[in-house]
C-alpha cells in the first residue's frame, strides 16, 4: 500500500491531484472525463497508466497489482442503457468492480493542459520552443498559460521530410501502422506541428501557422491529398496510440512525484491496425522511382 508520509493514498487523492492538473471543465463539451468507477475511500497501491481501457490493459493492470487505472480515452463516451457483462464494455466494468479497480479518465482536458498530451509527443521528437497549435479560445475555461490543442515547435536542426519521417518512426513506439508521410521527400523541415490523436481538424491551424510539417493520426485520403495539392505543410500520419503513448510517462512521473504511489505504464499497443504489408516493388519500379517513404 502506498503512502504519502504516513498516509495511505486513496482513490480520492488521485482524483483530487488529477482534477487539479486536468480540470474536467477544460474538456470538450462532448467529452466524458473524471472518475468513472471506484470507491473514493479505497486504498491505491499502484496506478496503471494506459491510453485505452480494454481487456488486455485491464489484465496487465491486474497482473501488476494495480487497483486504479488512469486512461486517456473514455470507456463510456456515449449513453449506455446496460452494463451487462454480456456486452464488451459491461464485461470490462464488471471485471474492474469485482477486482476493486478504480477507473479515471483524462482526455481532452489532458490534451489542452500545459504540459499536456501533445507536449509529451513534441518532447519525444526533440522539439523546443513549444506553443499551442490551436490555443484555447478567449473566454473558455482553459484560456491562457500556453494551453490549447496540439503544439508547434522547432527541430534542433533542419532535415529533409524523408529524414524527419525516419526520425519520427524511431522516436515513437513501434506499431504495425508505423509512420507515413505526404509531401516532397526532399523538402526541408524545421518547424513542426504535432497533435496527439486524431488531429485532422487542426490542418487549417497548421497552414496558418506556416509550419513545414504536421504530425498527427487518423488523416483521411481526400482531406490529406487536397491539403497537399493546395501546397499545405507536409503531413505525417502515425498510429493514434503511438502519438498518445508518450504522455503516459509524464503522467506516471507526476503521480509518483506528487503522491509517492508506484505506477505501471502500459506499452501494450492498443492500435486496432495490427497487420501491415509493404507492397513489393517490381524491378522497374525500383529502378525508375524514388524510394517510398
Ligand atoms: Zn486519442
Image (tube, rainbow, N blue to C red):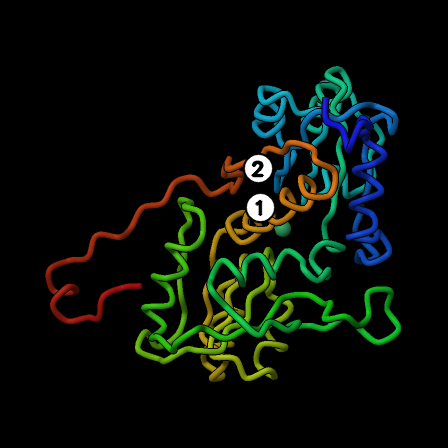
Residue at x 49%, y 51% (from the top left corner): 239
Picture residue at 40% right of the left edge, 66% below the top: 181
Q: Residue 73, percent across and down?
A: 68, 44
Q: Is residue 113 left or right of residue 217?
A: right
Residue at image position (37%, 64%) is: 165
Rendered image quadrant of residue 134: bottom right
Q: Which residue is mark 1?
A: 249
The residue furthest front is 5
Instruction: Judge the density around disc 2: few (<14), some (14-19), many (≥20) Cα neighbours within 10 Å.
Output: many
Report, in whole angstroms, how far the alpha carbon at label 2 lies from the one at label 1. Answer: 7 Å
Q: Nearer the viewer, residue 6 or 52?
A: 6
Task: Please name whichever residue, 275 or 97, is drawn nearer the observer in this view of the structure.
Answer: 97
Q: N-terminal of the two: label 2 or label 1?
A: 1
**Seen in the image, is 284 located left or right of residue 272?**
left
Left or right side of 235 for 70:
right
Q: Answer yes or no: is residue 257 visible.
A: yes
* Quadrant of the snapshot with the N terminus: top right
Left or right: residue 266 compared with residue 117? left
User: Where residue 65 appears, x then y in whole percent?
Assistant: 63, 20
Tell me the number on the disc at residue 265: 2
CB contact under 8 Å: marks 2 and 1: yes
Q: Position of residue 46 (x, y in %)?
A: 67, 28
Indicate the secondary structure of the residue bearing disc 1.
helix
Disc 2, SS: strand
Q: Residue at x 83, y 53 (%)?
A: 23
Amino acid at each position: 500500500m502506498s503512502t504519502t508520509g504516513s498516509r495511505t493514498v486513496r482513490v480520492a487523492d488521485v482524483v483530487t491531484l488529477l482534477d487539479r492538473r486536468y480540470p474536467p471543465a477544460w474538456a470538450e463539451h462532448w467529452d466524458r472525463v473524471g472518475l468513472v468507477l471506484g470507491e473514493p475511500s479505497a486504498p491505491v497501491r499502484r496506478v496503471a497508466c494506459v491510453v485505452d481501457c480494454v481487456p488486455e490493459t485491464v489484465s496487465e493492470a491486474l497482473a501488476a497489482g494495480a487497483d486504479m487505472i488512469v486512461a486517456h480515452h473514455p470507456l463510456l463516451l456515449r449513453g449506455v442503457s446496460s452494463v451487462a457483462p454480456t456486452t464488451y464494455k459491461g464485461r470490462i466494468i464488471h471485471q474492474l468492480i469485482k477486482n476493486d479497480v478504480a477507473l479515471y479518465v483524462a482526455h481532452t482536458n489532458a490534451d489542452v493542459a500545459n504540459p499536456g498530451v501533445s507536449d509529451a509527443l513534441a518532447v519525444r521528437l526533440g522539439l523546443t520552443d513549444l506553443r499551442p497549435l490551436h490555443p484555447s479560445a478567449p473566454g473558455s475555461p482553459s484560456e491562457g498559460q500556453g494551453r490549447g490543442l496540439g503544439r508547434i515547435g522547432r527541430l534542433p536542426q533542419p532535415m529533409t521530410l524523408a529524414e524527419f519521417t525516419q526520425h519520427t518512426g524511431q522516436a515513437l513506439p513501434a506499431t504495425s501502422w508505423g509512420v507515413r508521410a505526404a509531401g516532397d521527400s526532399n523538402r526541408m523541415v524545421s518547424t513542426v506541428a504535432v497533435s496527439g490523436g486524431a488531429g485532422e481538424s487542426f490542418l487549417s491551424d497548421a497552414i496558418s501557422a506556416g509550419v513545414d510539417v504536421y504530425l498527427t493520426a487518423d488523416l483521411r485520403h481526400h482531406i490529406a491529398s487536397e491539403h497537399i495539392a493546395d501546397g499545405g505543410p507536409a503531413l505525417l500520419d502515425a498510429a493514434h496510440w503511438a502519438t498518445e503513448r508518450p504522455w503516459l510517462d509524464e503522467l506516471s512521473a507526476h503521480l509518483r512525484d506528487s503522491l509517492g504511489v508506484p505506477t505501471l505504464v502500459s506499452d501494450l499497443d492498443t492500435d486496432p491496425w495490427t497487420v501491415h504489408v509493404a507492397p513489393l516493388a517490381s524491378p522497374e519500379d525500383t529502378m525508375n522511382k524514388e524510394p517510398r517513404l
